[in-house]
Amino acid sequence: MTFQEQLRKPVGRFALVFITVTNRGLSPDTFVPYGTVEIQDGEGRTYEEDSVVSFWAYVEYKTDIGAQVNPDATAYVIAAFDIPKRSDTYTLVPGSLANRSTGSILLSIP
């Protein structure tokens, strides 16, 4: 399979989210974006991370892809989402594998 055959095209557009993860606990922990964070559009639909595109973004931007983070250490992770073009405001929300009480972050995507 050639590199061109491996490229993925978005159904809508790709949103790349750069995440800084700091372990404030007392023991090492692992962070992976898949299932931990999702993007929600203004109509309440959620979009999971596209792990294949995230991998290519990880290679391109030289970030951590899923990080084993030691106490007080920081990792830099990238997550790619295929989101529709119909809305320009999205919210980063806890995913199905995350604690829903952790809150959310508002994103403005042009």
Image (cartoon, rainbow, N blue to C red):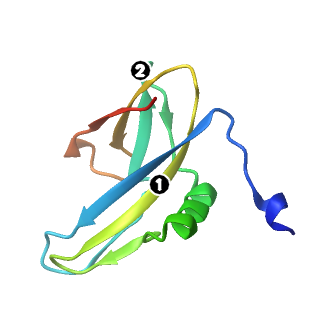
Name the residue beneath numbered marker 1. 79
Q: For residue 88, which quarter of the picture?
A: top left
Left or right, residue 90 beside residue 47: left
Q: Nearer the viewer, residue 33 or 15?
A: 15
| Number of numbered callouts drawn | 2
Q: Nearer the viewer, residue 97 or 33?
A: 33
Q: Tell me if residue 89 comes above or below residue 32 in the rendering.
A: above
In space, the residues marked 2 and 1 are separated at their CA atoms by 20 Å
Secondary-structure class at tag 1:
strand
Q: Is residue 34 visible?
A: no
- On the image, the x and y values in percent for residue 55 come to 58, 64
Name the residue beneath numbered marker 2. 42
Q: Nearer the viewer, residue 56 or 39?
A: 56
Q: Residue at left 49%, top 65%?
A: 61
- On the image, the x and y values in percent for residue 20 come to 29, 60
Q: Which quadrant would the N terminus be assigned to in this image?
A: bottom right
Q: Is residue 26 visible?
A: yes
Q: Residue at left 12%, top 78%?
A: 26
Q: Residue at left 40%, top 63%?
A: 77
- On the image, the x and y values in percent for residue 39 come to 43, 38
Name the kind of residue labelled 1 in the image.
Ala
Image disc number at residue 10: none
Q: Residue at left 34%, top 78%?
A: 68
